[in-house]
Image (cartoon, grey):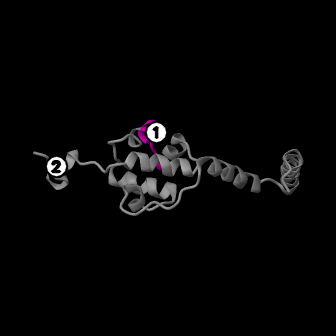
Amino acid sequence: MKLTYLEVPMKERTLKGFGKRLANVRRSQAMTQSELGEAVGVSKRVIAYYEQEDAQPPGALLIDLARALRVSTDQLLGIKVQKETTNPRTARLLKRLQKIEQLPPSDLRVVLKMIDGLLDRDAQINGHA
């Protein structure tokens, strides 16, 4: 006889898909496991553990994870539908662009000229306008 969710002892209950949701949100923020661990005060190994299929963090850590990832606890728990996440590759690019914004104006101009030059070259090679 199969037990219903509420009949399963509390210690054995898990939230299906928590680890996958945590990993997806972390990647969409272009964060490594180490960076997330540092942000919440745990090791990379702890984050890797909670990203596994049947693991889930204690309540206090859940709150810290949600804050560090700028999402609600409901989103991490799967109660609320997760917002559209950014492609991890795009998120890494955005993270770099935010760092570039902090450069001194002269360095920023150099970076922008390099980007413009690469885009112009690509347009000429590939016939993009």
Q: Residue at x 42, y 62 (%)?
A: 81
Q: Quadrant of the N terminus?
A: top left
Location of residue 126 in the rendering, given as x and y in whole percent from the top left corner:
84, 46
Taking the magenta stretch, the answer to whether it contains residue 46 is yes
Residue at image mark 1: 43
Image check: 43 left or right of 12? right
Residue 30's spot in the image, x, y percent? 59, 48
Q: Position of residue 49 (x, y in %)?
A: 39, 38
At horizontal 59% and vertical 51% (from top left) the residue drawn is 87
Q: Residue furthest left?
A: 1
Q: Nearer the viewer, mark 2 or mark 1?
A: 2
Q: Which residues are magenta?
A: 39-48
Which badge, 2 or 1, comes first in the chain's sequence?
2
Tell me the kind of residue under disc 2. Answer: Val
Residue 32 location, quadrant: top right
Q: CA distance from mark 2 to mark 1?
A: 31 Å
Which quadrant of the figure contains the C terminus?
Answer: bottom right
Left or right: residue 85 compared with residue 112: left
Is residue 116 found inside the magenta-colored segment of the image?
Answer: no
- Kind of element beneath mark 1: loop
- Give whichever of 91, 126 is nearer the camera: 126
Q: Main secondary structure of the magenta part?
A: helix
Residue 12 place in picture, x, y as percent:
21, 45
Q: Is residue 37 visible?
A: yes
Q: Identify the residue under disc 2.
A: 8
Q: Nearer the viewer, residue 107 or 51?
A: 51
